[in-house]
C-alpha cells in the first residue's frame, strides 16, 4: 500500500499531500489485541495511519489519510507494474478517429454496496452533477479541465450501458482521468439539489466523518464498517464488489482491513515488531533493524526502488493581502520572491549528507517534479539543472543579489534586516523532522537563521491551504507516470499551487495576488503537453517544464527515498511496486486466517 501514501492511493492521477513519511509508503500496523470483535476468526489485514480521516466525501477530500482507495473505483485504472490504463468499472471503450469522443461501455451487473444497481446514470451524475458542478469546491475539477480555455468535457448517456465523453480538443491523459471514482446518484443526488440557508448544496456537509458507516455507499472492494475517532477505521469486504477470480469466486479474499490510528512512526514500528502486525512502511532509520529480523519475524522487506513521490522545501511567494494585512511580511516576501535567494538555499542544502545520515543511503537526490518512473522524466544527464551542495556559490549568489554579511557573519538584506524565517513541517514524522533539523543547520552556514517548527497536522494544513499564514515549509507530494496529474499543482488556479495559492472556494478573498511569467509559462506548457498525442513531442514539452521549475525553484527538491515496505509472509499475491506499494492489488491478495 502506498502512503496510505501508498496505502492504496485514491487513483494514480490524484495528487495528495504526504503526511506519513517521505517514502510515501508508511502503512504500519497495530497489535490486534488492542481491538476486540465478535468475529472469532477472519482473514484480515491490519495497518495504521498517522491521523484521522477528515471526510468520507470523496469530492471534498484533498488530503491523506482517506478511505477512498479501498472504497471506490472509477471506469479505468493504471496498472502500477506496466503503466497501462486498464478497465475497472468499464468493460471497454472506443475512441473516435478525431480523438475527441470516447464511448465507454460499463460492465454488466454492477452494484453498489447496498445492492442497488450501478448504472450509466451514476456515471453521468458523478461527472456532471459533482465533479463539474461549480457549486461544489472540489480539486477533482482541475484534472478534468482541458486546453487554454480550461473547458470541461461533456458527458452524456448513450444507452443503458454506454456513456459518451466529448472533449473540446485532443487530451492525451483523458483515459487515465476516467479513473475518478464513480459516486452513487441514489444516495447523493438529493443533497446536490437541496440548498442550505446560505444557498449552498447540502452535499457540502454530506458524508462527514460523523456519518454512520452504513450510510456510506461505495463500489470498491471494501465498505466502511466502523470508525472510532483517534483509534481506528475498520473496513469490511463489499459483498457486491464486481471482481471474481478465474474460478468464479468473489473477490477480495481478505475479509477485513483495520487501520489503527497511530500518531508516531516509532510507535508503529514497535507494534509491528510485537509480531501481531501485518505490514509497516520501512523508513531508512528502521531498515537495518528490520532487515536483521526478517527471518525471525516471518516477514519480507520489499524494495521498489525510488518512490514516486517528491520531497521539497517551498517558500510562500504570495504577495497578496487579506483584509488589509499582507499574507507574508513584505520584507520577507522580497527575499522569498528573489530567485537568487531560492537558488542559494538550494545550493546550501547538503542532500548527500541527508541521504547518508537521515536516509541511511536509501535514497537519491531529487531534482524534478516528475517521478523518475515516468517516461516524461528529464534526468540531469539529459540537461536538467541540479543544485549540488556548494555553500560558497550560495554566498556568491546572495551577495550578487544585494545581500551582505554583518560583523557577526549573519546574512542581512540591503536594508540591514537579518535573514530569519520559520520553516514548518508536520510533527510526528521522524524523517521529515530530521531533514528539517539538517536544513536549519545547513542554512546557518550561509548566515540564515531558520526557526524549524513541526506542527500538528491539522494546524499545519490549515496554514498551508486556508489561512496561508506561513513563510517556508517542508513537504511532499505523491507522484505517478502522467505529468498532467500534477495540473492542479502547476496551474495558478489549481488547488495545490501552494507556493502562490489563490484563495479557494469559500475562503476570504485576497487582494494583490500576482502570477509570475514563469508560472504562466509552466501552466501553458502543461496545457500543450496534455494536448499533444505524440509521446516524443510530449516528452520535449514536459522537459521544458522541468527546466523552468529547476531554474525558478518554486519547490526546492531534496531526496527521493526508496519505496520500502515490510509485509508478513502469510500474505500471498504481493506484487510490490514503487507506484502501487504492497497492496495495490488487494482484491487478489490472500491471507492466512488471523485470530483477533
Image (cartoon, grey):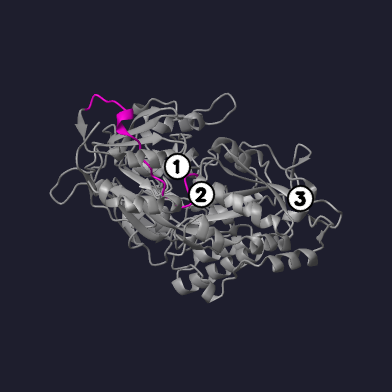
Q: In the rendered image, which residue does mark 2 sit on?
A: 431
Q: Quadrant of the C terminus?
A: top left
Q: In the rendered image, which residue does mark 3 sit on?
A: 332
Mark 3 crowd level (few <14, some 14–19, many ≥20, 10 Å Cα): some
Please report contact status of discs 2 and 1: CB closer than 8 Å, yes or no.
Answer: yes
In the displayed structure image, the side of residue 19 where residue 249 appears, left or right? left
Residue closest to the eye, 81 or 94: 81
| Residue at x-position 18% and y-position 49% | 245
Residue closest to the eye, 101 or 358: 358
Q: What distance separates the C-alpha of mark 3 from that of mark 2?
A: 28 Å
Main secondary-structure element of the magenta-colored stretch:
loop
Q: In the rendered image, which residue does mark 1 sit on?
A: 265
Give SS at disc 1.
helix
Q: What distance separates the C-alpha of mark 1 from that of mark 3?
A: 34 Å
Q: Earlier in the sequence, mark 2 or mark 1?
A: 1
Give SS at disc 2.
helix
Q: Is residue 101 above or below residue 293?
A: below
Residue closest to the eye, 442 or 515: 442
Amino acid at each position: 500500500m502506498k502512503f496510505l501514501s501508498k496505502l492504496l492511493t485514491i487513483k494514480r492521477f490524484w495528487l495528495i499531500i504526504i503526511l506519513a513519511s517521505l517514502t510515501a509508503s508508511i502503512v504500519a500496523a497495530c497489535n490486534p489485541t488492542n481491538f476486540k470483535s465478535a468475529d472469532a476468526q477472519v482473514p484480515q489485514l491490519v495497518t495504521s495511519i498517522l491521523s484521522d480521516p477528515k471526510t468520507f466525501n470523496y469530492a471534498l477530500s484533498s488530503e491523506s489519510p482517506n478511505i477512498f482507495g479501498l472504497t471506490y473505483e472509477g471506469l479505468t485504472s493504471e496498472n502500477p507494474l506496466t503503466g497501462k490504463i486498464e478497465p475497472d468499472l468499464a468493460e471497454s471503450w472506443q475512441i473516435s478517429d478525431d480523438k475527441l469522443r470516447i464511448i465507454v461501455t460499463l460492465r454488466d451487473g454492477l452494484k453498489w454496496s447496498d445492492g442497488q444497481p450501478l448504472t450509466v446514470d451514476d456515471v453521468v451524475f458523478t461527472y456532471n452533477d459533482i465533479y463539474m458542478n461549480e457549486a461544489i469546491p472540489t480539486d477533482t475539477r482541475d484534472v478534468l479541465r482541458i486546453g487554454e480555455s480550461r473547458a470541461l468535457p461533456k458527458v452524456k448517456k448513450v444507452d443503458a450501458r454506454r456513456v459518451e465523453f466529448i472533449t473540446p480538443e485532443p487530451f492525451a491523459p483523458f483515459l487515465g482521468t476516467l479513473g475518478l471514482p464513480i459516486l452513487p446518484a441514489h444516495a447523493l443526488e438529493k443533497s446536490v439539489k437541496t440548498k442550505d440557508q446560505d444557498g449552498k448544496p447540502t452535499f457540502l456537509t454530506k458524508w462527514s466523518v460523523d456519518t454512520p458507516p452504513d450510510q456510506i455507499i461505495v463500489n470498491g472492494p471494501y465498505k466502511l464498517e466502523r470508525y472510532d475517532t483517534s483509534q481506528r477505521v475498520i473496513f469490511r469486504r463489499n459483498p457486491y464488489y464486481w471482481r471474481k477470480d478465474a474460478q468464479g469466486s468473489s473477490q477480495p479474499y481478505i475479509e477485513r482491513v483495520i487501520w489503527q490510528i497511530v500518531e508516531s512512526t516509532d510507535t508503529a514500528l514497535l507494534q509491528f515488531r510485537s509480531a501481531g502486525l501485518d505490514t509497516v512502511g520501512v523508513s531508512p532509520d528502521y531498515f537495518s533493524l528490520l532487515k536483521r529480523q526478517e527471518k525471525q519475524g516471518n516477514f519480507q522487506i520489499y524494495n521498489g526502488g525510488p518512490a514516486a513521490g517528491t520531497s521539497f522545501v517551498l517558500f510562500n511567494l504570495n504577495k497578496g493581502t487579506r483584509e488589509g494585512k499582507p499574507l507574508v511580511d513584505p520584507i520577507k516576501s522580497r527575499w522569498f520572491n528573489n530567485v537568487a535567494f531560492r537558488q542559494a538555499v538550494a545550493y546550501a542544502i547538503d542532500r548527500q549528507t541527508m541521504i547518508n545520515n537521515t536516509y541511511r543511503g536509501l535514497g537519491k537526490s531529487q531534482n524534478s517534479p516528475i517521478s523518475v518512473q515516468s517516461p516524461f522524466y528529464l534526468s540531469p544527464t539529459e540537461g536538467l539543472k541540479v543544485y549540488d551542495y556548494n555553500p560558497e556559490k550560495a554566498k556568491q549568489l546572495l551577495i550578487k543579489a544585494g545581500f551582505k554579511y554583518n560583523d557577526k557573519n549573519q546574512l542581512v538584506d540591503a536594508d540591514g534586516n537579518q535573514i530569519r524565517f520559520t520553516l514548518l513541517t508536520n510533527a510526528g514524522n521522524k524523517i521529515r523532522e530530521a531533514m528539517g533539523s539538517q536544513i536549519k543547520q545547513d542554512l546557518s552556514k550561509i548566515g540564515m537563521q531558520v526557526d524549524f517548527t513541526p506542527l500538528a497536522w491539522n494546524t499545519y494544513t490549515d496554514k498551508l491551504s486556508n489561512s496561508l499564514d506561513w513563510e517556508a515549509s517542508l513537504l511532499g507530494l505523491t507522484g505517478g507516470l502522467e505529468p498532467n496529474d500534477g495540473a492542479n499543482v502547476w496551474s495558478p488556479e489549481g488547488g495545490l499551487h501552494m507556493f502562490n495559492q489563490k484563495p479557494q472556494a469559500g475562503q476570504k478573498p485576497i487582494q494583490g495576488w500576482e502570477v509570475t511569467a514563469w508560472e504562466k509559462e509552466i501552466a501553458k506548457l502543461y496545457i500543450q503537453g496534455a494536448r499533444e498525442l505524440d509521446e516524443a513531442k510530449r516528452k520535449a514539452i514536459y522537459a521544458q517544464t522541468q527546466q523552468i521549475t529547476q531554474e525558478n525553484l518554486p519547490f526546492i527538491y531534496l531526496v527521493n527515498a526508496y519505496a520500502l515496505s515490510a509485509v508478513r509472509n502469510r500474505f500471498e499475491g504481493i506484487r510490490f511496486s514503487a507506484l502501487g506499494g504492497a497492496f495495490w492489488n488487494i482484491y487478489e491478495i490472500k491471507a492466512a486466517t488471523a485470530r483477533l
